Image (tube, helix red, strand yellow):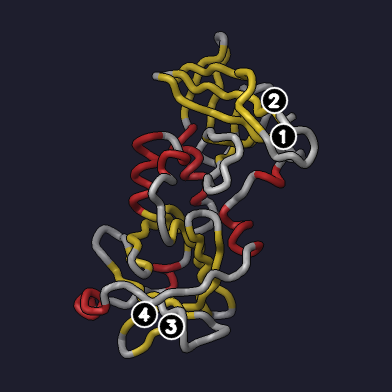
Amino acid sequence: MHIKTIFFTQFFILLFSFGCKEGTTGGNSTEQQASGKLLSTADLVGYWVNETWWEKVKATKSPKQAAVGLNGISGAILLESEGKVIVNLSYNWHEGAQYGVRTREGKQEFYDPNNAATALLPLIPLENGTVKFDDQTMVRLATSLEGAKTVAHAVLGGQYDLNGQQVVFNPNGTVVGLEGYNYYDIKFDYIDNMVDADQMTLSLDGSQPVVFAFKYEGDHLIISEIEDMGGSGKFDYKVGKVRWDLTKK
């Protein structure tokens, strides 16, 4: 039995479904004062990820490996609403918190709109378009929610051979040539990893996504089914039989 989407955590869903995490002050105020730069709404709005995590994802093709040692802000979605910037932070891809953006004494910071006296996280512009959110260096992957697709494509994207048939994982989150599946995605959150494997989803138009395990062996992308070992409600899963063995072109 496959794990359905109830167990597949997507970043932008988690941000609103988890309770607000207590904010902490931090960062280097001297560094921020030295930068002297204020970020515009256009500079801020978009999909941001932890730079260290992102580099590990690209190098290993394994979000599970990239999550090892991750501590603090892992991602952020910044949206403009009624002239204000709303900040949805993810901690370790597992917990969510929402902030606003304000400028005080010539410096920008995230603040808790429900308790403006606490949870101040400084924003420090760095070089090459990166920004420090508190003490984490973040990079913007897109100016919209499409950044999640950028991550999925970095891990799985490209052309593959499957028994003489071409399979393509496209940058826009679509897949072609894989038993009629239309869309793919990957899991980011591995704090509660019941399967102990990297995980992805495949779905048809209008259907509930199905979760699979995946791994790379050389130029082979091996996608396996996930078996339910404990029955309904037991949450005991393992990597099952190989469903597809794809060869990267």
Q: Amino acid at mark 1?
A: Leu
Say which residue label 2 marks. 180
Could you tell me if the residues under marks 2 and 1 are in contact, i.e. CB atoms within 8 Å?
yes
Q: Taking 83 as reference, is 249 above or below it?
A: above
Could you tell me if the residues under marks 1 and 4 are in contact, i.e. CB atoms within 8 Å?
no
Residue 209 place in picture, x, y as percent = 70, 38
Q: Find residue 194 and report its image quarter.
A: top right
Could you tell me if the residues under marks 4 and 2 are in contact, i.e. CB atoms within 8 Å?
no
- Pick whichever of labels 3 and 1 is earlier in the sequence: 3
Name, please, the residue furthest toward the top: 164
- Pick whichever of labels 1 and 4 is earlier in the sequence: 4
Residue 204 - label: 1
Separation of residues labelled 4 and 2 (CA atoms): 48 Å
Separation of residues labelled 1 and 4 (CA atoms): 43 Å
Residue 193 place in picture, x, y as percent = 57, 41
The reply, left or right, for residue 226 in relation to residue 249 is: right
Separation of residues labelled 3 and 1 (CA atoms): 42 Å
Q: Residues within 10 Å of mark 4 (few under 14, many from 20)?
A: many
Say which residue label 4 marks. 108
Say which residue label 3 marks. 102
Whether residue 145 appears in this view of the structure is: yes
Q: Taking 227 as reference, is 79 above or below it?
A: below
- Pick whichever of labels 2 and 1 is earlier in the sequence: 2
